[in-house]
């Protein structure tokens, strides 16, 4: 069974910082692109940042210069600085398994694993 579990959410004042962590099963972590997404009530889940298994990063425009994604040792991190009320959301960790290595591991060429989410609230 694949483990993917977020931690680190909470309440922070505007301008503050939080660091989210995601623990992932090593077997999936080794071959997956990892990402953070967020969702607010009534809205679709949106991409925040991704990092490939080779370390390439991609960010949504609204977080560039404020957030940083990293990965190491079966963990994925999202450092969030200068948080604003509009960053309030449930943040989800994603592991995107793809390709032949994915097929060898789980029997499918592509699959998305999601954590249960962690609430981030930015409020004075």
Image (cartoon, rainbow, N blue to C red):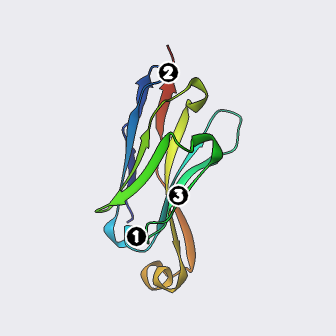
Q: Height in image: 117 above or below 58?
A: above
Kindly indicate whether the residue at mark 1 contacts the one at mark 3 (C-beta within 8 angstroms): no
Kindly indicate whether the residue at mark 3 contacts the one at mark 2 (C-beta within 8 angstroms): no
Which sits in the foreground, 100 or 82?
82
Q: Number of marks in the image?
A: 3
Indicate the position of residue 75 as horizontal and vertical percent values: 33, 57
At x 28%, y 62%, the residue is 73
Q: Residues within 10 Å of mark 3 (few under 14, many from 20)?
A: many
On the question of residue 86 being in view, the answer is: yes
Helix, strand or loop at label 1? It is helix
Q: Nearer the viewer, mark 1 or mark 2?
A: 2
Q: Height in image: 58 above or below 116?
A: below
Q: Residues within 10 Å of mark 1 (few under 14, many from 20)?
A: many
**Left or right: 64 with respect to 120?**
right
At x 42%, y 80%, the residue is 105
Q: Quadrant of the N terminus?
A: bottom left
Q: Nearer the viewer, mark 3 or mark 1?
A: 3
Res. 85 image quadrant:
top right
Which sits in the foreground, 108 or 54?
54
Helix, strand or loop at label 3? It is strand
Res. 112 image quadrant:
bottom right
Q: Residues within 10 Å of mark 2 (few under 14, many from 20)?
A: some
Indicate the position of residue 20 as horizontal and vertical percent values: 39, 42
Q: Earlier in the sequence, mark 2 or mark 3?
A: 2
At x 51%, y 18%, the residue is 123
**Left or right: 25 with respect to 82?**
left
Indicate the position of residue 107 as horizontal and vertical percent values: 50, 82
Which residue position holds label 3?
A: 50
Which residue position holds label 2?
A: 14
Q: Earlier in the sequence, mark 1 or mark 2?
A: 2
Which residue position holds label 1?
A: 28
Helix, strand or loop at label 2? It is loop
């Amino acid at each position: 069974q694949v483990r993917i579990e977020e931690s680190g959410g909470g309440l922070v004042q505007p301008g503050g910082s939080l660091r989210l962590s995601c623990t992932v099963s090593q077997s999936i972590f080794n071959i997956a692109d990892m990402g953070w997404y967020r969702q607010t009530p009534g809205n679709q889940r949106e991409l925040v940042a991704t990092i490939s298994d080779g370390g390439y990063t991609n960010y949504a425009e609204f977080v560039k210069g404020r957030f940083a994604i990293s990965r190491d040792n079966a963990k994925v991190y999202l450092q969030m600085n200068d948080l604003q009320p509009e960053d309030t959301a449930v943040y989800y960790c994603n592991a995107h398994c793809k390709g032949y290595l994915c097929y060898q591991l789980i029997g499918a060429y592509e699959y998305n694993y999601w954590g249960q989410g962690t609430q981030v609230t930015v409020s004075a």
